[in-house]
Every structure is written in C-alpha cells, then in structure tokens.
Amino acid sequence: MKLFIDTADVKEIREAAAMGLLDGVTTNPSLVAATGRDMRSVLQEICSIVDGPVSGEVLATTYKEIMDEAHDLAAIAPNIVVKVPLIEDGLRAVKTLTGEGIKTNVTLCFSPIQAVLAAKAGATYISPFVGRLDDVGHEGMELVAQIVEAYANYGYKTEVLVASVRSPLHVLETIRIGAHVATLPFKVIHQLIKHPLTDVGLARFLADAAKIPAAKKS
Ligand code: G3P
C-alpha cells in the first residue's frame, strides 16, 4: 500500500518525508487556504520536497476553464497530478487530460458508480471520501470495498486512493481491502506508529539495560 500525506503544510511534508515512508502528497483548496499562501508557490515547494505524485486541485467547474487550469498546474512539475471534481465537465476534462498523458485524481467521490465513471474517463486515481461518509452515518470503507470490487470486475487500472481518512482504523481497513493508496493527515501518520505497549516495553528494556554491568577492559 502506498502512503500519501494529505496536507499543504510544507513543514509537515518535510517531516513525513524524512521518515522515509512517504509515497506522495494530496492537497485540496481548503488545505492550501489554511497555509495562507498561493496555490502555485505551495505546489512548487511541495514538488521540490517529494518525488512522488503531488495532487493539486483545479478550482474551475466548467470544461474549458478546468482544462486551462489543469495545463497550468501540470506545468509546475512533472510529478503534479491534476485533481478534478467528480462532475460532468470534470469527467470530460479527465478524458482529455488522460489522452494528453496528464495524470488525474478524481475527487469528491461518494458512490461506486461515480468511481466507475471516473475509471472509464481514464482517471489515474479515484478519491472516495470515507470520513465524510462516516460523518453522515454511512460506512465510508464500505464504499472503498465496493469500488475495489467493481474495478476488479472490469480490470480498470485506476488506483483507489482512500481520502478523508480520520483514524488508524481507516488505514487498517484500507490494507485489508487492498486499496492502492491511503492519504493521511499528519496526525494519523503519527498515530500509526505509536503503540502504548511499544512505549512500555521500550521503557522496561532501557531500565533493565541500565543494570547490565559494563564489560571489563582487557
Ligand atoms: O483531500 C481530500 C480529503 O482527504 C479531505 O479530508 O478530512 O476534509 O474530509 P476531510
């Protein structure tokens, strides 16, 4: 499974990259707005830190404007993936962009049928938003399982990128279902590493190690 970080905060991205576990980055307009910086400079800096795919989202909602913005974003760096909303003009743009060899991430997916349409358009990634479904009383991870099943039925190559992840349980389910990617907030990356029994065990080993007599010098 590939691990992406879901943030536009370059400090978090540098720290996650230093852990050696980071395969890519996803951003969205809300995350970029939180940095107080402009979209282009943030994406440029992220691409200078990470070699893997970096998703930058278009703000337009009509075909021609989406295409113009997509070309501007794709020109930032070779590892930019253009993130496009799952709307009619968005899918049309994904089809054209795929034909041009530009990678796409279709975002705001809330149904398996939407996911199949994105795959038919040639999307590189589909982003089901699991946390936002959980928020309204639907099983977000059930959607991921349905998409993985649907893609396997037809042999679609689109990668399932689990987004709107809120906890390690979402990551565990991602692994069990076999989705290709999970994109995680910085906080969840840390939560994955921590286990109280690891901390207790390490403290005990270190306490016992202090009792080990030093070797005699020969
Ligand atoms: O990047 C899209 C997605 O991960 C957003 O997550 O927590 O705002 O629902 P969230």
Image (spheres, helix red, strand yellow):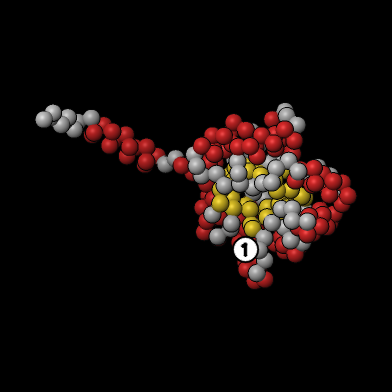
Q: Residues within 10 Å of mark 1 (few under 14, many from 20)?
A: many
Query: Which residue occupies 70% across, 42% down?
Result: 77
Q: Is residue 38 left or right of residue 203?
A: right
Residue under pointer 1: 148
**Spot occupied by residue 60 in the image (x, y as percentages of width and height):** 84, 44
Q: Is residue 107 left or right of residue 211?
A: right
Query: Which residue occupies 56% across, 51% down?
Result: 2
Above or below for 106 versus 196: below
Asked if residue 165 can be seen in this view, the reply is no
Above or below for 214 versus 184: above
What secondary structure is marked by label 1? helix
Query: Which residue occupies 59% across, 53% down?
Result: 181
Looking at the rendered structure, the kind of residue marked 1 is: Val
Above or below for 78 versus 206: below
If the image is split into quadrants, where does the N terminus sit? bottom right
If the image is split into quadrants, where does the C terminus sit? top left
Asked if residue 78 can be seen in this view, the reply is yes
The front one of 188 and 28 is 28
Place residue 8 in its image quadrant. Answer: top right
**Spot occupied by residue 130 in the image (x, y as percentages of width and height):** 64, 51
Query: Which residue occupies 27% across, 37% down?
Result: 205
**Spot occupied by residue 209 in the image (x, y as percentages of width and height):** 24, 33
**Spot occupied by residue 102 in the image (x, y as percentages of width and height):** 74, 53
Q: Is residue 70 left or right of residue 158?
A: right
